[in-house]
Amino acid sequence: MWGFKGFPIFDSNLARWALAAEDICFKNSLLSYFFRIGKCIPITRGGGIYQKHMNEALERLSDGEWLHTFPEGKVSQEDAPIRRLKWGTASLIVRSPVTPIVLPIVHHGFEEVMPENFWFGRRPPFPLCNKSINIVIGEPMEFNLPKMTQMAISMSRNLHNPTRGWPILSPSGLDEAAQRCLYTSISDQIQTSMESLRSSSKKLSEAKSLNSGQVEE
């Protein structure tokens, strides 16, 4: 997973890049070094979709690299429907020189490996063992950006939302209102796919638990 350079098992050239929370993974020099050699890009949560390290993520996509994002934008251990996605992932899809293919992935069970309230409201110092984890991978998603861009421009003509000073995107010429419509459309499609995978993962976990109970009997 990490792809440390020189590590005898993993090939760092094949490992993914990932967006990682600056306040968690880069809060001191040791952690910064560890996660940087793990091909993580620091992202400031709440810093907006045009923060400087998003440009580094775009460079990786331009190079044809695999970039792992967390579109919900926060750590969540709730067994609940996928929350509304942040626009960061959608903005990378739109701004990348080559439109990336999106591979949705959902996991279930990590909340048992590193539970938030394990000991006096804290996580355990190390991951817990003997826990069941399900990882469900969906079908690749491709986006027809020229068509979606025109739809976004049309939808945005009558919108009058407060602006945040976003730059006009070239060469499409998308203003902020049109960008909002386009990012929302892309995010909604990804969210729908992820929610379908979450339901599948939950059913798989329940089936495993049921089968385990029958064996024990």
Image (cartoon, rainbow, N blue to C red):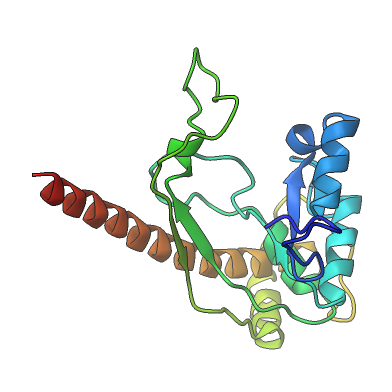
Is residue 1 depicted above or below 47 in this figure?
Answer: below
Q: Is residue 71 left or right of residue 111?
A: right
Q: Residue at x 87, y 50 (%)?
A: 51
- Rendered-image quadrant of the N terminus: bottom right
Residue 74 percent coordinates (x, y): 62, 42
Please indicate, yes or no, whether residue 43 appears anywhere in the rendered image: no
Residue 25 percent coordinates (x, y): 76, 37
Q: Along the line of sight, which residue is nearer the eye, 172 or 128?
A: 128
- Rendered-image quadrant of the C terminus: top left
Q: Along the line of sight, which residue is nearer the eye, 162 or 111?
A: 111
Q: Residue furthest top?
A: 120
Please indicate, yes or no, whether residue 62 appears anywhere in the rendered image: yes
Q: Residue furthest front?
A: 8
Residue 46 percent coordinates (x, y): 75, 40
Q: Residue at x 23, y 49 (%)?
A: 209
Is residue 138 depicted above or below 145 in this figure?
Answer: above
Q: Residue at x 14, y 44 (%)?
A: 216
Q: Is residue 209 left or right of residue 146?
A: left
